[in-house]
Amino acid sequence: MRRFRKAPYGKKRSMLRRAIFVVVVVLLLAACGAPSPTDSSGSASPEKGRDNPPASLIASPEVVARATIDAWGRNDRHMVDLLTAPAATTELLGRPFPQPSPALTSCGPDLRVSGGQTCVFNSGSQHFTFLIQPRPRGGWEVTAARFLA
């Protein structure tokens, strides 16, 4: 049977220091790369890279629908981006604003999306809808724009 010799005291200490150093470096790297989920006030931060729209503009499906139409009509790309999901932003900003100015016809529950609302607009002979869904942190957001003939 073979016996193992104990490492000298100095070697154990060196290995312990090295292990502690590695743990500290890993923790520091993890802390530097992880964004804080809360801001300085302690509330949840908005999505990375996106501002929060004013609460008054996302209070209800009808309000966010009208605010989105107003921003689109002014060619206010930043506000359209704040009020809509990326797919809806791309769809709206890829089209010219219709004339005459769209009129909101109705808003009601969407039959295909649980918790969603559909708002219908008319502009002359053109009709389109917005699918509006709750935001994760409160309020509403236009998640899709569908244009009909």
Image: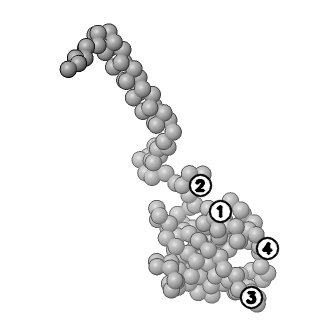
Q: Position of residue 133 (x, y in %)?
A: 52, 73
Q: Position of residue 60 (x, y in %)?
A: 51, 74
Q: In which quadrant of the rendered image does the C terminus lie?
A: bottom right
Give the structural element (helix, strand or loop) at label 1: helix
Q: Earlier in the sequence, mark 4 or mark 3?
A: 4
Foreground residue, 127 or 65? 127
In the rendered image, which residue does mark 1 sit on? Answer: 81
Give the structural element (helix, strand or loop) at label 4: loop
Foreground residue, 94 or 101? 94
Mark 3: amino acid? Ala
Q: Position of residue 108 (x, y in %)?
A: 52, 85
Instruction: Tell whether label 2 touches label 4 (CB within 8 Å).
Output: no
The part of the image, by quadrant, that contains residue 69 is bottom right
| CA distance for labels 4 and 2 | 24 Å
Query: Pointer 4: residues within 10 angstroms few (<14), some, or many (20+)?
Result: few
In the rendered image, which residue does mark 3 sit on? Answer: 149
Q: Nearer the viewer, mark 4 or mark 3?
A: 3
